[in-house]
Amino acid sequence: MSAILELADVTRIHGSGATEVRALRAVHFHAHAGELVAVMGPSGSGKSTLLTLAGGLDQPTHGAVRVEGVDLASLGYKGRARMRRTSIGYVFQDFNLIPALTAAENVALPRELDGARAGVARRAALQALEEVGIGELADRFPDEMSGGQQQRVAIARAVVGERRLILADEPTGALDTDTGEEILRLLRARCDAGAAGVLVTHEARHAAWADRVVFLRDGVVVDESGTDPAESLLESDAAR
């Protein structure tokens, strides 16, 4: 089965000379349809860099990033932006909602930017909000919602339409335990429905929702396991 997301021998270097930082070093990574992959590692290990490359928000210094077989570098700026609106959903830790837009308008925006008529985009947005359990909040503004409700809006925006790849960067970091678990349940359900998901997290209990756990350290994949993430992390540290 071909991968929805593939990073092939990817290196990302920031700066040059004395200020050079190798955020990722010859990384190979993949995520298939129906699979949720957790990415773990200490601060500065390259987790967020991997996610920004996967979402086409940055480009590798070396190697290739492919989504459904398409090399993102071959698309150009406009092509990558279109893919983010149609095929890639990105869930940020700080929500990134537009305060002046309602929940439905925030969710509909990617569809409208892609040329969908307003009525079509709104229907898709309402369906996505229902999917994440807050259809009744469609006409509320972000400052009228709790943190957990705002994150559900962010997830609805990430999955609206036919998104095949869902990327989540510490999506539960600002939420209480119960709300965080519900957010992870939503991500898990979307993957079970056929999307590929990548979850960056530092919590082993959150990584337990994943099918596979990839550990990064200093920009290198040091372990990859389908077993218990806490146990794998201990084994990885013991092997150093």
Image (tube, rainbow, N blue to C red):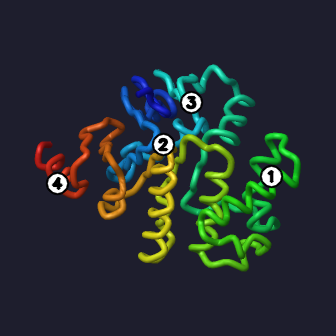
Residue bearing the label numbered 1: 121
Q: Is residue 86 left or right of residue 48?
A: right
* Residue closer to the observer: 51 or 116: 116
User: From mark 3 to mark 2, how far is it between C-alphas?
Assistant: 20 Å
Residue 18 x %, y %: 43, 32
Give, as a three-letter code, the residue at label 2: Ala
Q: Which residue is mark 2?
A: 196
Question: Dot 4 lies on which element?
Answer: helix
Disc 1: CA contacts within 10 A as few (<14), some (14-19) or many (>=20): many
Q: Amino acid at mark 4?
A: Leu
Residue 27 locus on image (x, y percent)? 37, 30
Which comes before the other along the chain, label 3 or label 4? 3
Reading the image, the residue beneath label 4 is 234
Tell me where residue 131 sits by quadrant.
Answer: bottom right
Q: Amino acid at mark 1?
A: Ala
- Vertical arrangement, residue 32 with respect to residue 230, above or below: above
- Asked if 35 appears above or below 63 in the picture, the reply is below
Q: Earlier in the sequence, mark 4 or mark 1?
A: 1
Q: Is residue 163 above or below residue 174?
A: above
State the separation of the CA atoms marked 1 and 3.
30 Å
